[in-house]
Image (tube, grey):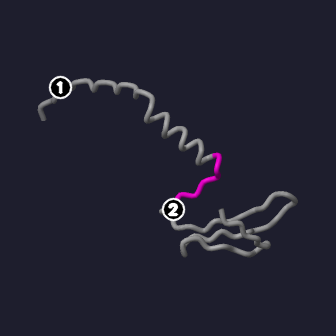
Amino acid sequence: MLILSRKSGESIVIAGNIRVKVMRVEGDVVKIGVDAPPSVPVHRQEVYDEIQRSNQQALTQPGASLPKLAKTEKTPQ
């Protein structure tokens, strides 16, 4: 893990197209901004963990069967 020190208003760049900027520090809370291309998903860790759990459940639980479509008669036009 790379550990960096940054002051408010300073940034780091990841892979040339993702910028993480320290917006402000309020007590023990650091506000950061992430500027990334739309194709790069950015999530808080707890949201990412929930997405992973949901995806894993979808893979391991048998899916509910889909309802059968009702047959309809074609009406002559």
Q: Is residue 72 magenta?
A: no
Q: Main secondary structure of the magenta part?
A: loop
State which quarter of the image contains the N terminus.
Answer: bottom right
* Mark identifier at residue 32: none
State which quarter of the image contains the C terminus.
Answer: top left
Image location (x, y in percent) of residue 76:
12, 31
Q: Residue furthest front?
A: 1
Residue at (65% x, 68% y) in the render = 20
Please state which amino acid type lies under the numbered disc 1.
Answer: Glu
Residue that mark 1 sits on: 73
Instruction: Determine the image quadrant of residue 64.
Output: top left
* Mark identifier at residue 40: 2
Q: Marks 1 and 2, how far apart in space? A: 48 Å
Residue at (78% x, 61% y) in the render = 30
Please state which amino acid type lies under the numbered disc 2.
Answer: Val
Residue range (magenta): 40-46
Above-or-below relation of 30 to 72: below
Total label count? 2
Left or right, 62 with reference to 4: left
Left or right, 31 with reference to 16: right
Above-or-below relation of 52 to 10: above
Residue at (40% x, 28% y) in the render = 63
